[in-house]
Image (cartoon, grey):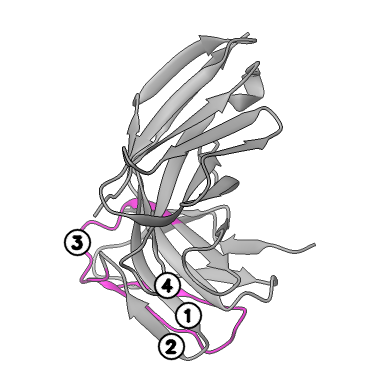
């Protein structure tokens, strides 16, 4: 059963805490992405990775960090430096380049306590 | 930055009617894609249309592209309650050598029985 999985579905963050969102794909895709979606808005790119051990900042990278140690995995850490982290976070992947069709995970909703 | 802008922001129709939504963008593109998002879920790819194509069909979906006007339209024919969702256009700008998608804010479609 191929696809992208994200966990957890809901995540609660306390002030000053770092939290990590998981994203795993078994599509054998080279490229992976993290987007943030706020209510009634489109997707904004946080980070993207074209290949293992490489990643680039997107439009809103401040307060976030990523790693790409394995092709299948692209975890996102929301650090305490991100002052407004409440949002819906979507992970996606594409076969090679960013302009190709992207396949999305089900999303993680992050809420601040 | 948002490249695509959808219009209208929201659309309410009855089952069996057609739904049309438009997307305008600012810079030249390699391709334009349409995605659907059900409430609280990830995005699902619908259609990709390349800059040298003018029209594409997929089932009840018809997409047109007018590069001279920098606009695209998505038509859903004979709509069903299951078509209730938000629809996003995403553009792959010609100026971006690797190709990151820029998403619009979406059109929210409600289909009532």
Residue at 19% x, 61% y is A83
Distance from Cα at disc 2 to Cα at disc 3: 26 Å
Q: Image point 45% across, 78% down: which residue?
A: A49
Q: Please state the horizontal and vertical placement of residue B58, each as a whole percent of the image.
A: 68, 37
From the image, state whether disc 2 or disc 3 is nearer to you.
Answer: 2
- Label number found at residue A76: 4
Q: Please give left or right for residue B70 compared with residue A100 in the image.
A: left
Image height of B38 relative to A15, above or below: above
Task: Pick whichever of labels 2 and 3 is earlier in the sequence.
Answer: 2
The chain holding disc 4 is: A
* Residue drawn at x 22%, y 56% as measured from the top left: A84
Q: Which residue is mark 2?
A: A54
Q: Earlier in the sequence, mark 4 or mark 2?
A: 2
- Is disc 1 on the same chain as disc 4? yes
Callout 1 secondary element: strand
Q: Callout 3: residue from which chain?
A: A
- Specify the label residue A83 is tagged with: 3
Dot 1 surroundings within 10 Å: few (below 14), some, or many (20 or more)? many
* Mark 3 → mark 1, Cα distance in angstroms: 28 Å
């Amino acid at each position: 059963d191929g696809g992208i999985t994200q966990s957890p579905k809901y995540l609660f963050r306390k002030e000053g805490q770092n939290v990590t969102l998981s994203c795993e794909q078994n599509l054998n895709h080279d490229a992976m992405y993290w987007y943030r979606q706020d209510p009634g808005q489109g997707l904004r790119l946080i980070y993207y990775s074209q290949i293992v051990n490489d990643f680039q900042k997107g439009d809103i990278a401040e307060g976030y960090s990523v790693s790409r140690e394995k092709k299948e995995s692209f975890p996102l850490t929301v650090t305490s430096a991100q002052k407004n982290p409440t949002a819906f976070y979507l992970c996606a992947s594409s076969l090679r380049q960013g302009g190709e069709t992207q396949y999305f995970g089900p999303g993680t909703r992050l809420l601040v306590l | 930055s948002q490249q695509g802008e959808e219009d209208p922001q929201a659309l309410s129709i009855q089952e069996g009617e057609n739904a049309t939504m438009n997307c305008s963008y600012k810079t030249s593109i390699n391709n334009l894609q349409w995605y659907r998002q059900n409430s609280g879920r990830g995005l699902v790819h619908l259609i990709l249309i390349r800059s040298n194509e003018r029209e594409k069909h997929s089932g009840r979906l018809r997409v047109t592209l007018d590069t001279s006007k920098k606009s695209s339209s998505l038509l859903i024919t004979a709509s069903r309650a299951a078509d209730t969702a938000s629809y996003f256009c995403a553009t792959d700008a010609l100026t971006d050598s690797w190709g990151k998608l820029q998403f619009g804010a979406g059109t929210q479609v409600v289909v009532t029985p």
